[in-house]
Amino acid sequence: MNNVPAAWYLVLAALLFGIGAFGFLTHRSALIMFMCIELMLNAVNLTFVTFARTLSDISGQAIVFFVMVVAAAEVTVGLGIVVSVFRRRSSTSVDELSEMKG
Amino acid sequence: MIAVAYTQGAVVFATSALLILIGALGVISVRNPVHAALCLIMTLFGVAVAFVAQSADFLAAVQIIVYAGAIVVLFLFVIMFLGVDSREHVHFEPLVGQRAFAGVGVALTVAGLITLMARSHWVTGAVSVSSKLSNGSGNVKELGTAVFTTYLFAFEATSALLVIAVVGAVLLARRERSTTSEEVSQ
Amino acid sequence: MAHVATLILLLPLGGFLFLLVNGRNTTERQIGVVGTGAVAGSFVLAIITFVLLLHHATREVTVNLFSWISVGSLHVPAALLVDPLSITMCLFVTGISALIHLYSTGYMHGEKDFRKFFLYLNLFVFSMLLLVLANNLVLTFVGWEGVGLCSYWLVSYYFDRDSAASAGKKAFIYNRIGDVGMLIAMFLLFSRLHTLNYLSIFSRAGTLSPTIATLTVLALLLAATGKSAQIPLFNWLPDAMEGPTPVSALIHAATMVTAGVYLLVRMSPVLALSSSGRMTIAVIGGVTAFVAATIATSQKDIKKVLAFSTISQIGYMVLAVGVGAYSAAIFLMISHAFFKALLFLGSGSVIHSLNGEQDMRKMGGLAKYLPLTFPTFLIGWLTISGIPPFAGFWSKGDVLTNVFEHNKPLWVLGVATAILTGYYMSRLFVLTFRGTERFREETHGHDPHESPWVMTMPLVVLAALSILGGLLDLPWVHHDSLAGFLTPTFGYVAAGGQASTLAQYGLAAVDVAAAIIGLLAAFTIWRDISSSTKYEIPFLEHVWHWDDAYDAVIGRPLTQAAQFSDDVIEPRVIDGAITGVAVSVRRSGEGLRKVQSGFVRHYALATVLGLAVVLVYLVARVA
């Protein structure tokens, strides 16, 4: 099952990353943007695991382990921020949070 | 035998690729945030399949349990709680040139990544015999050893991080002690 | 002898320092004694040095005081050169200065800045002695600047008078322009000869190319015209009459204005190398003498007549230098110091007796009220006109004889000037001392009083010197007298005095005739009138409109350029550049500030674009 060239998975990960990046840049809703961040993180995880397989090094998988932990923590805190911002403004559009301008 | 394995691997790859890409495209294009969360689950499943195909069984399990099971649920919870499951105006872009530049930037990034991968030299899909990674299942032992010995410090740090995250979340979501309490109706 | 010579220099300096320090609680008498005593002491020491020099083995003694500048190949010691020329200058400078100091104690009595006057006067004498005793050009230049500075201070002594203040500035600025000439001469000489010591310059002067020699001579001439008030830098001297009369007598008649002539005479070995330079000097001298004499005929202020007369007489000296008659120039310098100081001090006495009146139209008939001033002034008048046997006849005659030998046209100019000299001095004499009394108004009906003895005694001494001054250099004993004493210091001695005895008598007769023509003309015209539009020509009275010409050609354009700089260049170019830098910084800041739009998505886009750039670069490297 593992004889698929690693390059395919890597290309898949790159495409996933690209889709996630594009979504992040074009959506205004904070929640959708978070989901796109999750897409990008998953793309990275896929890349790490692919390289762990090709280089036969467990460290790649260990890194993915930690990435998942951090992603969980990040989502927790991030959504907490979204909730408290929403309480003030009744909108999740990030374009509204533009007071820190030059 | 190898041809069969090859074909099997290709089928698995195709499945995971399909799930991932359709899910991802769904996330960025559906209007309803709840539908977007469901598409995200689809992508996560696809990634889990890819993990299994690459001998990362434990990670595939963790992916389903933590990511799809907890994080996406959290997303859905917040979406419902805030009541933003109505449609969003995706076609109207207030920032001038954002979409164009975003498209260009992302295209260049992906193209660059793919080109780099194509031009670089690395090992092909054959598995080495004497490696830390064992074939098929049974990776958990190696992973556990790595996490609890080589990367112990990172492990402890991430556990502290989780505690901090929980405390932070509680603090952020706390209501202020005011006479009027906000009731968010569904 | 070294110590005596050094003390000549240090006594006036000591006087200056003493007066500087002990200002507050000294009486006029003490100040006068210290000031006059210092200079009189210098005079005595000068006589002693002179006697010692006569008996010395060599007639050139260098007194090294200390090593002053020693940089690379430039070695300038603070050293004195005691030789016939410098000791001659010392003698008459200190002698006349002592007499004028004595005179000033009476003339300046009651002035509120009495101490300041003597302070500056002593400093002036020190600077002048430094100028003549120095053994190198740099130390001479120090003295040169010093006398210019003291002249500025003393001319604007009554500084609360606008005319006096600007006269001081005018004197200083004209002197400064001349100083550029001296600096250029020093640069040229040092660059070619690598020394600024007189003796070294003279021994190496032969190596100078004709062009450089001519340029140096012209530069020295520029310096001399500035200091000695010749064309084109003479306009400051008439204005300098704003200073008190003793100042006019000392600085602007006897000493400072002769410094230019001294410099040219001292540099005679360099002058010997450039005949075109010498011709220029002679022409300038002759023309200045004539022009100044014409102007003097139409002046109404007694001191202004004497000022233009000074310019004219110095013109004679410069003319003599130009034709190479150096000892004649020095002879005229010494006798001019005697009679011009006498005339100035006498006029000071007249002004003092009339309570400050200087306009000759308000004088007249003073002969019987000033029993000492009148006869001494008469002697001075006869001397300057060139009547034998007074000093002026011999000295001016010496100059004109030498000029005749070399340049007939300039001799004619000199004789014409002599006629005018006789004329204007006689006009002055008649208007002041003879004729009707027109001063009653000024003295409020009182009779004018004679001056005190401190003022009249110097007049008597100077009158005696004017009578006897001719003995210094009588034509038939040239080699045993002044000329013989001075000749070894000159690099080139004109073939003067070689004219036949007949020619000399003829020239002498011409000189006397010229003087008498002038005298008679003046007496005839001015006996009965005190002012006349026919004989006081406005063009001459306004100095041939020379000042106006300078103003129009130099003064006004420069002022306009300065105004333009102030109005246009200052605010637009200079301020504009500086504020322009500030403004452009601010504008670029305001422009760049818009990058911070506040939108998170913009920042994210920037990150992604940056990432794209990095990846493109990596791809390019791998490719």
Image: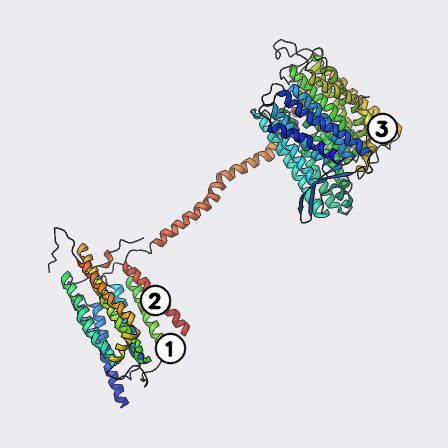
Q: What percent of the width, then of the height, locates residue C411? A: 79, 30
Left or right, residue C66 beside residue B16? right
> How far, Cα to Cα, is label 1 from label 2?
19 Å
Q: What percent of the width, then of the height, locates residue C557? A: 57, 36
Q: Relative to B17, say whether C220 is above or below.
A: above
Question: Could you tell which of marks 2 and 3 lies nearer the N-terminus?
Answer: 3
Q: Relative to C214, say whether C426 is above or below.
A: above
Question: For numbered disc 1, what is the local secondary structure?
Answer: loop
Q: Residue at x 17, y 56 (%)?
A: A87
> How far, Cα to Cα, is label 1 from label 3?
115 Å
The quadrant holding residue C248 is: top right
Look at the image and tell me whether residue A81 can be seen: yes
Q: What percent of the width, then of the height, locates residue B112? A: 35, 72
Q: Which residue is mark 1?
A: B120
Q: Which residue is mark 2?
A: C611
Q: Residue at x 79, y 27 (%)?
A: C395
Q: Quadrant of the C terminus of chain C?
A: bottom left
